[in-house]
Image (spheres, rainbow, N blue to C red):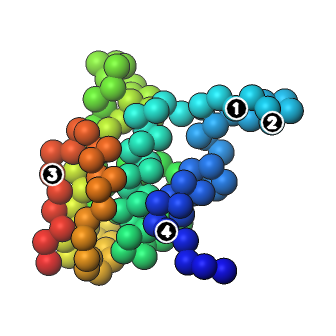
Amino acid sequence: SAEQSIQWKAYRYLLEERTDVVNDGDRKLVVTLAMGRERILQVYALSVFYNSFGWEYYTVGDSECTWPGVSCRGLGVHSELDYVEEDDLRVVALEMSGRNGPTQYAGPVLEGELPIELMFLTDLETLDVSH
């Protein structure tokens, strides 16, 4: 088979591998979103980013806020509450230099261009891809 684009891989990850993105109707004719649109774009952008460097991010769990190098903060409409819903968490930092975070997980080799899809991370404050 022909090689799939990184965007197509991210799209398929959202629709085929995750169970929290869409609600299928009884007859599969009606499909509704189970996840907020902003979060869908956030997961998509991160998926494209990780795919562009050949990193299997999806092996570390469904919550993108727990993926290595990703930091989130409650910035959604309900962020003032004591408990922040997962849909209200926004990626505020993407730090891929050297070893990342408290687990000291070695990140992927970053070579090439950053994908334009990172623009969907509208609350991103820190992007560190230094060597």
Q: Position of residue 26 (x, y in %)?
A: 84, 30
Closer to the chain start, of discs 4 and 2, is 4
Residue at mark 4? 5
Marks 3/1 in contact by CB < 8 Å: the verdict is no
Give, as a three-letter code, the residue at label 3. Answer: Thr
Residue 68 seen from this side: yes
Residue at left 15%, top 45%? 125
Marks 4/3 in contact by CB < 8 Å: the verdict is no
Give, as a three-letter code, the residue at label 1. Answer: Val
Label 3, label 1: how far apart the Cα atoms are: 35 Å
1 relative to 91 in the view: left or right = right
Instruction: Give residue 126's mark.
Output: 3
Instruction: Give residue 28's mark.
Output: 2
Figure quadrant of the N terminus: bottom right
100 relative to 25 in the view: left or right = left
Q: Residues within 10 Å of mark 3 (few under 14, many from 20)?
A: few
Q: Is residue 30 above or below residue 131?
A: above
Q: Residues within 10 Å of mark 4 (few under 14, many from 20)?
A: few
Closer to the chain start, of discs 2 and 3, is 2
**Label 1 residue SS:** strand
Give, as a three-letter code, the residue at label 4. Answer: Ser
Q: Position of residue 37 (x, y in %)?
A: 46, 32
Label 2, label 3: how far apart the Cα atoms are: 40 Å
**Label 4 residue SS:** loop
Give, as a three-letter code, the residue at label 2. Answer: Lys
Residue at left 40%, top 34%? 38
Residue 102 seen from this side: no
